[in-house]
Image (cartoon, rainbow, N blue to C red):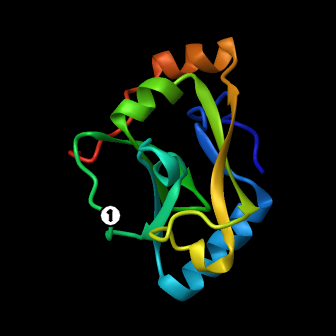
Amino acid sequence: MSAPGGPAGPVRRVELSAAAETLLEQLAERHGPLMFHQSGGCCDGSSPMCFPRGEFRVGGADVLLGRVAGDTPFWMSASQYTYWRHTHLTVDVVRGRGSGFSLEAPEGVRFLLRSRLLTDEEMERIAAEPPPATGDA
């Protein structure tokens, strides 16, 4: 895992654990370019969902939190972003079945989020950055 953004770059809001990065690489080999979306719905909707890129339509109510594993976008619903905007998120993978809609479900594992509060310094840097892109952009 890489450290959240350095002084010269934007603050990284989301990253992958080593296990999640390995799984994402395997899924990308089978399915092509991927994307994540965190909707915040109940039950499985509260877990990050992995889709073939473009199969889940994002719009103005979705925020681009960042990109992981190179160029894999991680989208979050704007309502969830309101709750998570003060945190750094790490996508991890654990054993167990998650949603049948997320690509990792047939593997007997599921993605989940681990979080930590952003530091005061990270929050100050974020305040100086442009707002995150939305699906309208």
| Relative vertical location of residue 14 with respect to residue 54 in this rendering, above or below | above
Left or right of 23 on screen, residue 98: left
User: Which residue is tagged 1?
Assistant: 56
Q: Residue at x 68, y 74 (%)?
A: 108
Left or right of 18 on screen, residue 24: left
Q: Quadrant of residue 56?
A: bottom left
Residue 18, position as x, y percentages in the image: 79, 60
Left or right of 30 on screen, residue 40: left
Foreground residue among 122 and 44: 44
Q: Residue at x 70, y 62 (%)?
A: 20
Residue 34, position as x, y percentages in the image: 47, 70
Q: Residue at x 75, y 54 (%)?
A: 17
Q: Quadrant of residue 8?
A: top right
User: SS of the residue at dot 1?
Assistant: loop
Residue 13, position as x, y percentages in the image: 58, 37
Q: What type is the residue that disc 1 sits on?
A: Phe
Query: Which residue reaches farthest front?
Result: 43
| Relative vertical location of residue 93 with respect to residue 91 in this rendering, above or below | below
Foreground residue among 128 and 56: 56
| Relative vertical location of residue 3 with respect to residue 18 in this rendering, above or below | above
Locate the C terminus and report the quarter of the image it occupies: top left
Q: Quadrant of residue 131?
A: top left
Query: Which residue reaches farthest bottom?
Result: 30
Residue 2, position as x, y percentages in the image: 75, 47
Total label count? 1
Q: Residues within 10 Å of mark 1 (few under 14, many from 20)?
A: few
Q: Residue at x 49, y 83 (%)?
A: 31
Foreground residue among 84 and 129: 84
